Amino acid sequence: MDKYSEMVMKMIIYEYSQEAPITKGIGANSEEIQNMRLETSKVSIKSPFSILAFFQDKCIGIAKGRFDNPKANRIAAIGDEITKNFSYFIPNCKKLFVLHILFVQPYFGGKGIATKLTEKSIQLARENECDYIMSVPSNIKSAHIFTKSGFELAREIPFDAFKENGQPFLKDLGDGNKCTRLMFLKIS
């Protein structure tokens, strides 16, 4: 494993897992969803479309199954439901760029890094002749960045609609967000 792979794995498993609003919302800790995040980091590392943000020698941001843990499965269920039949919203799409993760360490927040990662993702989608970019922001800041970047809202589902044994399984995400969104940007 090269130094970047290890850096990305540690950031996704330990920092992103603890800071992601969706993880907090279901009350999961990093150990409970470590295998899910390990798979995410392996895919991210191998993908030619992963974008990493560095500050000096530290990776501070990344833009970018089924699991053996119920809390990891809850996260997957939210993603599966919001993206169900997504092609309905983009009927003539031949090539889709999916922005899975947009994360910047909290210490570096508010400095435009997430916006730059989004802009670089849009650039990559254009360079690869994609018709659309799709993303599912789980926090209010990402949704705002995507809206500001021209993404359009296709669908939203309130978090309290996601239930297990009749009870909502999401708690407060801590940012005032009450729903998950499916957003698209048409690449011109």
Image: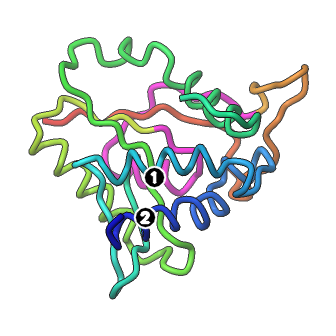
Residue 92 location, quadrant: top left
- Check residue 148 for magenta coloring: yes
Between residues 19 and 148, which one lies in front from this camera angle?
19
Question: Image check: 180 left or right of 142?
Answer: right
Between residues 48 and 105, which one lies in front from this camera angle?
48
Circle number at residue 41: 1
On the image, the x and y values in percent for residue 179 come to: 65, 37
Please, what is the three-letter code of the amino acid marked with disc 2?
Answer: Val
Question: Image check: 125 left or right of 85?
Answer: left
Please, what is the three-letter code of the amino acid marked with disc 1?
Answer: Ser
Q: Could you tell me which secondary element the residue under label 1 belongs to? A: helix
Question: Image check: 72 left or right of 97?
Answer: right
Residue 17 location, quadrant: bottom right
On the image, the x and y values in percent for residue 71 come to: 75, 39
Which of the image's four quarters has the C terminus?
top left
Colour mode of the rendering: rainbow
Between residues 65 and 184, which one lies in front from this camera angle?
65
- Disc 2 + disc 1, Cβ < 8 Å: yes
On the image, the x and y values in percent for residue 143 come to: 49, 48
- Check residue 120 for magenta coloring: no
Question: Image check: 45 left or right of 178?
Answer: left
Magenta highlight range: 136-159
Q: Could you tell me which secondary element the residue under label 2 belongs to? A: helix
In the picture as drawn, the residue positioned furthest to the bottom comes out as 56
Circle number at residue 56: none
Earlier-in-chain disc, 2 versus 1: 2
Q: What whole-number distance in Å separates the C-alpha atoms at marks 2 and 1?
A: 7 Å
On the image, the x and y values in percent for residue 185 come to: 29, 36
Compared with residue 74, is residue 38 higher up or lower down, i.e. above or below? below
Callout 1 environment at 10 Å: few (<14), some (14 to 19), or many (20+)?
many
Circle number at residue 8: 2
Marker count (numbered): 2
